[in-house]
Image (spheres, helix red, strand yellow):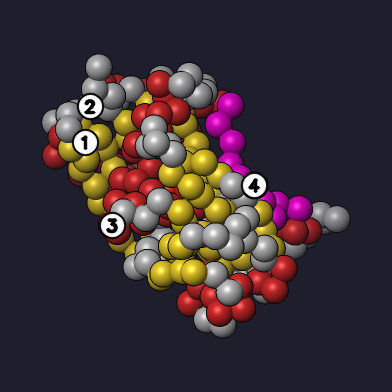
Amino acid sequence: MTLKILAVDTATENCSVALSCGDHVISRSEIAPREHTNKILPMVDEVLAEAGVALSQVDALAFGRGPGSFTGVRIGIGIAQGLAFGADLPMIGVSTLEAMAAQSYRLSGATRVLAAIDARMGELYVGQYQRTQTGRWQCLGEEMVVAPDALLPHSNQGVWTLAGTGWPAYPDLEAQLGLQSVRSDVLYPQAQDMIAIAQHAYQSGEAVAAELASPTYLRDKVTWKKLPGRE
C-alpha cells in the first residue's frame, strides 16, 4: 500500500508543506519568518489540489514537532491538529533535527549528520544521527539544548556532515570540536524530508490520535519562565 502522508512544518524560519502521492512527493517551501500563519494553509491547499487528493483521503498527518522556535512549533502543531481533527487523521511528530539529517542524505548522500539549530540565548539545539541499513535514522544519544562550548560529539571517528543554522551562528565551533567534517547546504528542515520518516513511523504503529500529539521544545522550562506570572 502506498501511503499518503501530508507533512507540515513551521518550527524554524522556513515554512513548508509536502504530500506523498504515489512514487513522488509534492512540496512547497518558503523562508518566511513571522508569516507562517498566513502561508501554511494556502500551501496545504496547493499540494492537495496539485495531487487531486482530498484531505480526508490522506492516511496520516506529519508535523515538525521541534525543536525550534517556541512560537513556530506551536503554530505547526496547532494547525496540524486542526487539520487532523477535521479529517479524523492520525498524527506523527517528526524531529526537525532528524529531518535535517534526512535532507542532508537526500542532497549529498550523508549518513552521519550533526544537526544544530541556533536556539538563541547562547545555546544550540543539537541532534547526532546515523543512517541505518534499513534507511531509518538512529539518534546517537539524545537531542539536547546545549551551550556551544559544552557540545561533545558522540564520536570523533569518521566524517560528520554539519547541518543547520547553528554552524553559521557559531563559525568557530567546527574547528573547536576537532572533527572530520563537511558543511552541508542544509540550514532548515523541509517537510518533504519528514515524509519518509513519517512513513516508517506509521508502518511501525507510532501514529497517535490528534489529541495525543505533542511538541518537543527541549528548553520549555526556560520559555515558560519568560511569560508573565510563570516561575
Residue 227 visible in the current orientation:
no
Mark 2 and mark 1 residues within 8 Å of each other at the beta carbon = yes
Which numbered disc, 1 or 3, marks the residue that appears first in the sequence? Answer: 1
**In the rendered image, which quarter contains the N terminus?**
top left
Provide the residue span drawn in magenta: 212-221
- Residue farthest along the bottom direction in this orientation: 172
Residue indicated by mark 4:
141
Give the mark nearest the N terminus, 2 or 3: 2
Q: CA distance from mark 4 to mark 3?
A: 25 Å
The answer to if 110 sits in the magenta stretch is: no
**Mark 3: secondary structure:** helix
Q: CA distance from mark 1 to mark 4?
A: 37 Å
Q: Residues within 10 Å of mark 2 (few under 14, many from 20)?
A: few
Q: Which residue is mark 3?
A: 107
Q: For the residues marked 2 and 4, what is the alpha-carbon distance in whole angstroms?
A: 39 Å
x 67%, y 63%: residue = 152
